[in-house]
Image: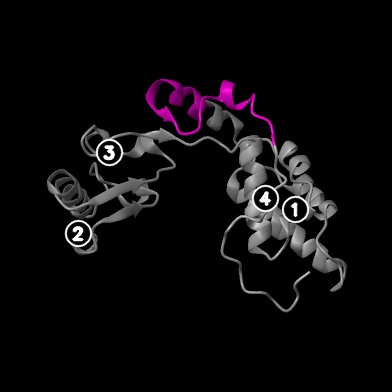
């Protein structure tokens, strides 16, 4: 931890991104049988966040924020806590466009509005897997088969999103977010009104493309 924060200070100004912070700080409240190592690591992070004077902007993500100690979440350490909900229709269309572009497909050749409309409750990771599954389905039909809307539709129909298999937990998180945290992209009642206004993009999104494979379809 000390080496990590020193490196962040050395390259400042920078953004320090801590992904799934609750995993790294598991056991910070004691009781893990590690002779207090996790507690000391947590203390080092807290002290650094309090005393650091370098231009290091710290961002952390968490799937289970309830597992984090309150002293980490107070104002002055993290200035704000945002709840990021599942993507709305317009965001899903853009996510489809991004992943199609990454796999060397022209997103303007696909009916993104239709696919976005039927993927209500899908996460960004699930939409990515839909594209990947559709690519495999197209390749399975033959090397000369091109990816089409029907392949995406088939992959969507075969996917069971977490919002369906764990719907009760997501509903509970949303209810808690109304009273505890700020919404990153608006409350559900506002987002439910959002429509896929115009997903016909003049140019593909500027995202890095993956290296082409031998069996590109």
Q: Quadrant of the N terminus?
A: bottom left
Q: Secondary structure at mark 4?
A: helix
Q: In this image, 171 relative to 137: left or right?
A: left
Which of discs 4 and 1 lies nearer the camera? The answer is 1
Q: Quadrant of the C terminus?
A: bottom right
Q: Is residue 184 magenta?
A: yes
Residue 29 x, y percent position in the rendering: 24, 41
In the rendered structure, which segment of residues is drawn in magenta?
172-197
**Residue located beneath label 1 in the image:** 108
How far apart marks 2 and 1 lie (CA) works out to 43 Å
How far apart marks 4 and 2 lie (CA) works out to 37 Å
**Residue located beneath label 3 in the image:** 78
Which of discs 4 and 3 lies nearer the camera? The answer is 4
Which of discs 3 and 1 lies nearer the camera? The answer is 1
How far apart marks 3 and 1 lie (CA) works out to 40 Å
**Residue located beneath label 2 in the image:** 9
């Amino acid at each position: 931890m000390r080496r990590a924060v020193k490196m962040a200070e050395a390259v400042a100004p920078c953004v320090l991104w801590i992904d799934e912070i609750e995993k790294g700080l598991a056991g910070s409240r004691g009781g893990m049988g590690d002779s207090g190592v996790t507690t000391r690591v947590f203390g080092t992070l807290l002290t650094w966040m309090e005393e650091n004077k370098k231009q290091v902007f710290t961002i952390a993500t968490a799937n289970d924020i309830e597992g984090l100690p309150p002293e980490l979440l107070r104002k002055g350490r993290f200035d704000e806590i945002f709840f990021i909900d599942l993507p709305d229709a317009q965001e899903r269309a853009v996510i489809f466009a991004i992943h199609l572009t990454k796999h060397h497909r022209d997103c303007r050749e696909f009916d993104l509005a239709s696919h976005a409309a039927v993927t209500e409750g899908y996460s960004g990771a699930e939409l990515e897997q839909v594209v990947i599954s559709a690519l495999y389905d197209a390749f399975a039909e033959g090397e000369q088969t091109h990816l089409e809307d029907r392949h995406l539709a088939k992959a969507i129909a075969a996917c069971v999103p977490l919002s369906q298999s764990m719907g009760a937990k997501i509903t509970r998180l949303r209810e808690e977010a109304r009273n505890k945290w700020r919404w990153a992209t608006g409350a559900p009642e506002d987002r439910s009104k959002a429509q896929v206004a115009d997903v016909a993009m003049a140019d593909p999104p500027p995202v890095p493309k993956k290296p082409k494979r031998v069996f590109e379809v």
